[in-house]
Image (spheres, rainbow, N blue to C red):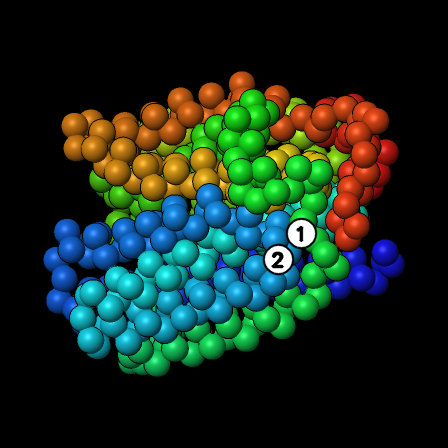
Amino acid sequence: MTTAIVERAKRSVFGVFALCGLAISTLLSRVPQVRDTLDLSPGPLGLLLLMIAVGSLLSLPLAGFVVQRIGTARTVAVMTGVNAAGLAVAAVGTRVGPPLAGAGLFLFGFGAGQWDVAQNVEGAAVEQRLARSIMSRFHAVFSLGTIAGALGGAAMNALGVGVLPHLLAVAAVVAGGGVVTARGFLPGAGDGTAADDSGPTGTVRPAWIEPRTLLIGLFVLCMAFTEGTGNDWLGVATIDGYGASATVGSFAYVTLVTAMTVGRWFGPQALDRFGRVPVLRAGSVCSLIGVLVVVSGPSLAVAFAGIVLWGLGAALGFPTGMSAAADDPARAAARVSVVATIGYGAFLAGPSLIGAIGDHTGVRRALTLTAALAAVATALAAATREPAPGPAPGPAPGTAAPLSPRSAGGDPTTG
């Protein structure tokens, strides 16, 4: 496979990650207007937004089978279309009523789940072809996409543009962009692979009983909890816990996202030099310290230093866990599907769990649970070590060849 094909695939993966961030943040940026248009109180609004999570949860376990059957390119092309259709239906639902809006959000989440697995499988294949770490940079571009979507939502609000035309326009961009970018993916990446490829039972289900895959999933869950609770609760923690203004609370969130984006962009250099396990352990410890500083810091300025440590430490956990799940290209789709399903549980459980504890202790103190899970991640990081090479058969046609182990912490042989 030529260098030009791999470079084209790399650009395409950057594109689909950016689109994914754009789609999600565009929708979330208009939630207040959706609430006002449908005249919803917090309880019904929460149930409406839950439809996104329900769609994703039903989609993720199926993603490995779908990717194995039709490949990453077709999965992204189809599922960006499903996601965009859901966004459009939800937009129309703001004029029709909550049931239609909920149906649209379900489709949005369903498409996003399989889209996410497919883009991570493709990203891992590109990473293996390049023989150097790059997965976290794909996730950094996702973060940039979310920033673009959030700024776009703010601009539409400032200009008085309604939810319906805004979401329909972005849906068109997502649907068209997904088809165009997926054309640049590696030929055959992710499709029909393992020798026991006989359907969902023969390919996907065994991944649910593989100890290494489950441990990686638990590691990703811990790091996703560390990331997600920061996204959801930092603003509240700084406002309620330190008496900050609403503007400063928003800036706390921006600081976390910026630190994570920087960590994801420059992190691959550390991964290639020192290996996965040492870097991920250092990152989880860094997050642990950062969270504890936020929880117990003497001042708001010190808390902001903790936020920077928190974001830098959490940056590599989720993307590098996906790379580890995809170490064997022949089984990457199934294993990434399992790890993503386990990991996304943190994004669902995290907000409500911190909220429930925060009712009794305050949100700032409740974040101590986040530090505890960062500590657990430190112990689980060893599961991401790349398996030693053996006499196993080579990958199926059209998939990436496995690399020599650079992630065990020894001398890297690639740059």
One can see residue 211 in this view: yes
Circles 1 and 2, Cβ within 8 Å, touching? The answer is: yes
Residue found at the far front of this picture:
198
User: In the picture provided, is 117 more to the left or to the right than 97?
Assistant: right
| Spot occupied by residue 18 in the image (x, y as percentages of width and height) | 55, 61
Which type of secondary structure does the marked residue at label 2 adopt? helix
Q: Is residue 231 above or below residue 404?
A: below
Q: How many numbered circles does the render carry? A: 2
Q: Which residue is mark 2?
A: 70
Foreground of the two, 360 or 206:
206
Quadrant holding the N terminus: bottom right
Give residue 387's mark: none
Image location of residue 371, percent across then percent down: 40, 25
In percent of the image, x 14 and y 51: which residue is there?
Answer: 43
x, y percent for residue 399: 75, 49
Answer above or below: position of 362 versus 319.
above
Question: Residue at image x 35%, y 81%?
Answer: 165
The three-letter code of the residue at mark 2 reads Ile
Q: Residue tagged by mark 1?
A: 191
- What x and y, as percent, mark residue 291? 41, 30
- Snapshot quadrant of residue 153: bottom left
Mark 1 neighbour class, 10 Å CA radius: few under 14, some 14 to 19, many 20 or more: many
Task: Identify the residue at image location x=72%, y=26%.
Answer: 387
Badge 1 marks a residue whose secondary structure is loop
Q: Tell me if 267 is positioned left or right of 352 in this view.
A: right
Separation of residues labelled 1 and 2 (CA atoms) = 6 Å
Which part of the image, by quadrant, shows the C terminus?
top right
Position of residue 396 relative to residue 166, above or below, is above
User: Which amino acid, by three-letter code, is at mark 1?
Assistant: Asp
